Image (tube, rainbow, N blue to C red):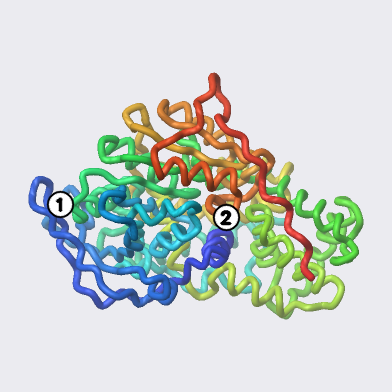
Amino acid sequence: MRRTVTTLAAALLAAGGLLPALPAAAVPERAPGSAATGVAWGTCAEPTLAQAGAECGTLDVPVDRAHPEGPRITLALSRVVHTSAARDYQGAVLFAPNPLGGSGYTSPLLSARLPGGTAGAYDWIGFARRGLAPSVPALSCDPAYMDFDRPDYVPSAPADEVLWRDRTAGYAADCGAAHPGGLLDHMKTTDTAADMESIRRALGLDEVSVYAQSYGTYVAQVYSTLHPDRVRRMVLDSNVDPRRDWYHANGFDQAVPLEENLRTWFDWLAAHDATYHLGATRAEVARVWDAQLARVREHPAAGAVGPDEWIDVFLVASYFQQTWPLLGSAFSGWVNSGDGETLKALFSQLAQRGNDNTYAALLAEICTDGPYPADWATWRRDSDAAHALAPDTTWGNTWFNAPCLNWPARPGTPVTVDGSRVASALLVDGTKDAATPFEGSLEVRARYPHSSLIAIDGGLDHGGTLSGNPCVDGAIARYLADGTLPARASGRRADLICAPLPDPLPAG
């Protein structure tokens, strides 16, 4: 999955950007069995958190849990405090941070979207996962890596492939050089799950409810496997398939679904040809698309947007339907008016040009959760096979993940996800979610026998809970209010079917 997707999602949810470290002093982590130290909550420096009246604080944790006396890092925490009377208080909801969506620091703002007043019964706790600002230190390897007019993702000659292999190996080497102190060996999902447990203890809570979206669902799966007695309720939105390693889950499993969703956007553009003037059928829009890719390959738009940037911008349409009008206007503006500046601005915004903190921290996790194929021939064979079916979506993901081939840290052994001891969980996913295909949610449901699954039939939005769908959001509110789950059906299928939100209207 591209980083562009997650940064846009954060923008759409008003989740804010990456900020400097907070000035508050760190609070030492409580050792198991000792009295809770608590977290010293204070004013938030992050604007959207401050505007919402949230509180912020910090917590020190060991880099390596096996050596708690060794180096420590500082996690930045945020909290939206409950507003209910004490008798109605239901504890804390701790967000499992999404590695693809940035830090998780502003996640508590999502609580404002929960209908029915349920949010007020909880404290909502977020944190910037290790390696991501404003937690300290913040990883960064090469701020110029995601820049304009990069080499074409799709190698048309052996020299192109060598160029990208050298480029991705260089990024991995830069990460090793920039962070030699051992943190890269302790950026795994298990480390983030241990940080969640440290936060729970520091808050002095016997148990927490957990909310997770996208790749944060895997963090929640690992946490609940390791600490099932500490999980009260759990909402998992767009579930990672626990059977799949990151080599497949963050790459080849997505290629064809992403391509299919892109073509679904073409259908929508064709239905609104009177607005966008890109063709009246999917085939006509596809021909215009291919022609423009060839055009920017020869002459980058605004002297900066080549085929890679083009794909990074418009592939967002495969993840979020609400972006279709914005991206349709940008596509039409380039084709019909030669407006390359909008494309340039969108790439700068969506790819966070000049800030690779999210990308570096993501790789630090997925490159070390488990081993990757060590021979490039396997990567090339799998990429060629996927490219034949998904020519727009395959090679970009291959090169996005390719630094893992040379990553300067030891891979670990993935946790076998087992939810049999988790009291309850509510799962949600769209049946056309490309980033976390629906079959993954069915597998999570099978591993969590006390869970229920909501299927958004035909929905392609990724990580889209609490976005105004009354069927989905109402079920989440009921579950968090009193633990009510949709009745569990027999067999391997969803327990509640919700319709997706209507397609967006065209711009203007």
Amino acid type of the residue tagged 2 in the rendering? Ser
**Rendering quarter of residue 288:** bottom right
Q: Is residue 119 above or below residue 373?
A: below
Q: Secondary structure at mark 1?
A: loop
Residue lying at 57% horizontally and 30% vertically, measured from the top left? 494
Q: What residue would you read off at disc 1?
A: 67
* Secondary structure of residue under mark 2: loop
Q: Is residue 453 visible?
A: yes
Residue 467 badge: 2
**Which residue occupies the foreground of this view, 213 or 141?**
213
Which one is in front in this view, the residue at disc 2 or the one at disc 1? 2
Q: Position of residue 319 (x, y in %)?
A: 63, 53
Residue 30 in which image quadrant? bottom left
Q: Position of residue 242 (x, y in %)?
A: 45, 35
Residue at left 32%, top 62%? Answer: 81
**Of callouts 2 and 1, which one flags the residue occurring earlier in the amino acid sequence?**
1
Residue found 13% across the figure and 54% down from its top: 36
* Residue 248 seen from this side: no
